[in-house]
Amino acid sequence: MKQSSLLPLIIFILMFLWEQVAPYGDYKDKKANFICNILIALINTLILRLIIPIQIYQSLDQYIPNFIEFKNMPFNFLITILVFDMAIYWQHRFFHLNDFLFRMHKAHHTEKFLNVTSGMRFHFFELILSSLYKVFLLLVFNPSLENYLWYEAILLSFSLFNHANIKINFKLELLLSKLFITPLIHRSHHSPKSVSMNKNFGNIFVFWDKLFKSFEIQETRTYGLSGCNYSNNFKAQILIPFKKS
Ligand SMILES: [Zn+2]
């Protein structure tokens, strides 16, 4: 197992334990469908093993001239994380702007009880499109593969952290949120209110939302999509992109 893939595993275990000890929302009477999310995550892992952006990138790279090479730049690790984080900010924003793309992203937003497993709940159509976009980014920017793998590990770790149902000291979270996306910021993106849902597209760093005018900070305790009542089971969630509304 690569060192970078250990990071999200450690974060998952930590967040899961934190949710048991100090949860943010009380879900005792509600039903979060952990099995649905874990099944989606398992399928996504399988798909990623088949469509690994790195392998497509390596097979295409020989045919495409390299104008930009992050791997030869100073501070290449930081540059890779920053540029990829900004690119995925825009990917997320476009998935909300475009109706066709939003159909793929909907399954992520139908979650009514945010928890650590929600951070892995992405429809595999969205995952495939995102993987192809990442191949494009790899071909354009040519980071070192080690840096790219660390970026992926950090991205997934932040996704697990930002969706986790965990209580954090408010002052500490406000301080953290000066630089990073935290659960407080990401929860409002899962609000059923469309104004809030179309804010806070960031994944790791908070400054893209501030720079591109999509930042808001608002405590939210209700999540999901208004006007949509999809069952929260695996089959219903997988079929969402084929539904008209
Ligand atoms: Zn979203």
Image (cartoon, rainbow, N blue to C red):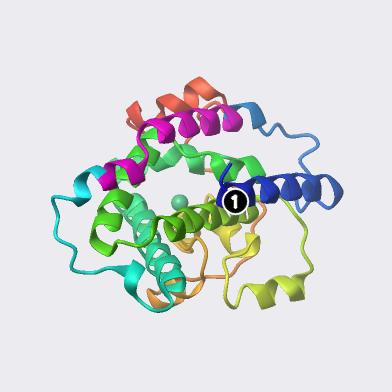
User: Disc 1 on helix, strand or loop?
Assistant: helix
Q: Residue at x 35, y 67 (%)?
A: 71
40 within the magenta span? yes
Above or below 181: residue 241: above
Q: Residue at x 34, y 55 (%)?
A: 91
Q: Judge by depth and name the residue closer to the eye, 145 or 130.
A: 145
**Residue 113 appears anywhere in the view:** no
Q: Judge by depth and name the residue closer to the eye, 198 or 74.
A: 74
Residue pointed to by mark 1: 3
Q: Position of residue 8 (x, y in %)?
A: 61, 49
Q: Position of residue 34 (x, y in %)?
A: 66, 32
**Residue 192 appears anywhere in the view:** yes
Q: Position of residue 87 (x, y in %)?
A: 35, 62
Residue 82 lies in quadrant: bottom left
172 within the magenta span? no
Q: Judge by depth and name the residue closer to the eye, 62 or 53.
A: 62
Instruction: Name the main secondary structure of what is drawn in magenta.
Output: helix
Above or below 65: residue 126: above
Quarter of the picture holding the N terminus: top right
Q: Residue at x 86, y 49 (%)?
A: 21
Q: Residue furthest top?
A: 235
Q: Which residues are magenta?
A: 37-58
Q: Residue furthest right?
A: 21
Name the amino acid type tagged 1.
Gln
Residue 102 lies in quadrant: top left
Q: Position of residue 125 (x, y in %)?
A: 36, 35
